[in-house]
Amino acid sequence: MDHDDDAVSPGWDTQRIARTALIIAVVILSIWMLWRFVPALAWAGVLAIATWPLRQMLVRRGMGKTALAAVLTFVLAFVLVLPLIGLGIQAAHESGAIMQWIGEVRQNGLGTPQWLEHVPVIGDSLAAWWQTNLAEPGASRALFGRAETSGVFTLTRTLGIQVANRVTILVFTLLTLFFLYRDGDRVMKEARAIAERVFGPSGAVLGKNAIAAVRGTVNGLVLVGLVEGVLLGVAYAVAGLAHAALFGLITAVLAMVPFGAPVVYIACSLYLLAVAKTAAAAGLLIFGTLVVFVADHFVRPILIGSTTRLPFLWVLLGIFGGLESFGLVGLFLGPAIVSVLMAMWREAAE
């Protein structure tokens, strides 16, 4: 009996090694082949996780899974695409006005603002640079002429390529999202079974932590960012800024990154200060700082930390580390990875 077991064992080990090597090779080839579409798959996963409670509620109400998947995908496409179209149209209108303004500056120059020289420490240097490069028509014509010849055509070509890539990613994101909504229950069941088989009982727990981290991050970043954009958009309108809705939309997008909203409202406050609207500039600066302070120090830690059991410092590290490593989708993948890491740490410690 022992002799037979010894005779079978080497062959079994060889088959197991060959099977493992085949699995690794297929996985590597699949990732290499689908690498361009990984962002679309990641975005579809993030959107599906974030909206899964809504999907489950509609399933419990008796809605068919195929019809449900089609409706939810259409709604998300409408929500995602419509603002982008509006932003593109607005940008096209604004680009015409900007080019007209550049032409006027090249022709007549742009006078040095009186407040510029009063800026602490660097005011004199800024005023001197402005006087040399912008105030005189000849100098401004040379400056903007170099910008037009060296940058505009390259920027336009690059922008066109990027738009085509983003449209491709968006189409495959929505297509993947449809199938996740329709077959998500089966996919999750199979993923849970594989995780438990490979990693043991803790595999399912780690998966739940990652899903909770993604959902909490979406709530903490996207929803809070939208609220910040609405509040500051109203503040822009009250302060008398033109195109307040556009600035509110830009603020909402940047506010999805912690400390991103100040870039917009501080720039708007400086513009109001430049046109001698001191009270409006001060009010906008104070109101924007208050909104961002409450959102980043109270609301986001509660929404994200309560679901992931992560200190806000680790949430920030996951957000910015994911953003640097994976791009925009890393905003949501980063906290999920950190959450799994911390769960493994706790399990090892216990």
Image (tube, rainbow, N blue to C red):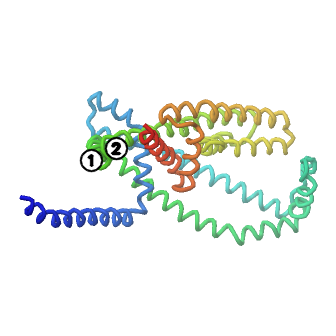
Residue 166: % across, % down:
49, 57
Whole-Å distance between the Cαs marked 1 and 2?
8 Å
Q: Amino acid at mark 1?
A: Arg
Q: Residue at x 42, y 57 (%)?
A: 38
Query: Compared to 226, does 99 lie above or below?
Result: below
Task: Report x, y in % for residue 44.
Answer: 41, 48
Q: Residue furthest top?
A: 61
Q: Residue at x 53, y 32 (%)?
A: 303
Disc 1 + disc 2, Cβ < 8 Å: yes
Q: Which numbered circle lies on residue 203?
A: 2
In the rendered structure, the answer to whether residue 113 lies left or right of residue 161 reads right
Q: Which label was assigned to residue 344? A: none
* SS assignment at label 1: helix
Between 249 and 23, the one lying in front of the other is 23
Q: Quadrant of the C terminus?
A: top left
Circle 2: element type:
helix
Asked if one can make out residue 92 in the rendered structure from this viewpoint, the answer is yes
Residue wearing tag 1: 197
Q: Which residue sits at x=48%, y=42%? A: 342
Q: Quadrant of the N terminus?
A: bottom left
